[in-house]
Amino acid sequence: MIEPIAVYTDSLTLYWSAIVIALGIAACFTMGLALYTSYAGNGRALWVMFPLALAFSVFLCRLMHWYCHTEQYAGFFGAVTDYSTGGYVLPVAILGVLLAALVVRALGFTDNVARLLDAIAPGGALAVAFIRLSALFNSSCRGKIAVKTPFLQHLPLASPVYSSSAEDYRFATFFVQFLLMLLVFLMLYRFYTRRRNRPMKGGLSRDGHTARLFLLLYGAVELIMDSTRYDSSFLPFNGFVSVVQIISAVLVVYVLVYYSVLSVRANGLRFTHFLMWILFAAALGGGGMCEYLVQRHGDWYLRCYAGMGLCILILCLISWKMYTGCCAKPRTE
């Protein structure tokens, strides 16, 4: 399948997928700038941070992809200098954004990194959605699940994969992730505008919760969606759990640990904490077992991903419960 060209001249070839990605990055910057200047601080911080975040993220995402797929590159130098081919491990961009925010603070453009990250979190979800949407304009939607039911052989669940012999319909991994990340964007935007300044118990900080909710939801989406890809990136010493799933699990666990510490600090250690921690561990283990089963039994897709989705939903709800337990009750007039 030839990737559709939007603009072609003697010196320039511009593909539609690149335009969609550029629109997503622009939407992320515009949304972050609007939220930050309206609710938090000076827009100069975003103007300085955004180019740094792009540079750090592209480099780090490519670096991780090179580490997982050294056979696709002509050495390290070629991988980090020639970006016309190859791939990226998208969740590593989170580290690039964090590094950029720390540089901005060191330069004196902000004194509150958490507040800055809160403002760009909704736009970050929107950028990921656009990046996945760009797969509609090329042949990179890499779902491994064959869809054989004619009624389902269309978007949003399936997309055609063309070969020399036949047309094969596969699960539209990237398009489904586009829809899920749009939902995450709406949830984050609502959270930021409605709950951003909700008082916390014991004088706990109000900042950073939108960013952590992004980490939780994005990690939850990637945990299941990366499992549906046939080209997942694996560490050289681990061929079972992909590097994206490892990063996503770390993000989800981090959010729970963070709010567990806050909840114990605000409410004291209670029996309900132990119940939620046990349930969280069981759900995390259940998700891992579903991943094991779907890799060992190729015809168990529906059952395994339904179970994995339920386990991931439980993980998110427990973390949300921990967060709300740290919030003070609204004052009544």
Image (cartoon, helix red, strand yellow):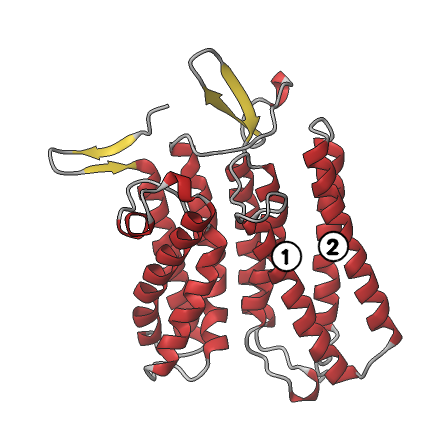
Report the Cα–Cα distance between label 1 and label 2: 8 Å
Residue located at (71% from left, 78% from top): 261
Q: Secondary structure at mark 1?
A: helix
Dot 1 and dot 2 residues touching (CB under 8 Å): yes
Is there any visible trace of residue 327 in the rendered image? no
The residue type indicated by label 2 comes to Leu
Residue located at (54% from left, 67% from top): 211
Left or right: 75, with 302 as reference point: left
Q: Secondary structure at mark 2?
A: helix
Instruction: Examine the rendered structure and indicate whether residue 123 appears above or below residue 231.
Output: below
Residue 322: mark = none
Instruction: Examine the rendered structure and indicate whether residue 67 appears above or below residue 276.
Output: above
Q: Which residue is mark 1?
A: 249
Instruction: Examine the rendered structure and indicate whether residue 120 appears above or below residue 332.
Output: above
Is there any visible trace of residue 80 in the rendered image? yes
Residue 284: mark = 2
Q: Position of residue 326 (x, y in %)?
A: 71, 77
Q: Quadrant of the image for the C terminus?
A: bottom right
Judging depth in this view, the residue of 329 and 106 nearest the camera is 106
Number of numbered discs: 2
Q: Position of residue 101 (x, y in %)?
A: 41, 73
Q: Position of residue 49 (x, y in %)?
A: 34, 70
Q: Position of residue 185 (x, y in %)?
A: 53, 55
Q: Are there few (<14), some (14-19), or many (20+) residues within 10 Å of tag 2?
A: many
Left or right: 73, with 14 as reference point: right
Residue located at (57% from left, 30% from top): 144
As drawn, the residue found furthest toward the right would be 271
Left or right: 33, with 90 as reference point: left
Q: Earlier in the sequence, mark 1 or mark 2?
A: 1
Q: Are there few (<14), some (14-19), or many (20+) residues within 10 Å of tag 1?
A: some
Residue 203: quarter of image: bottom right
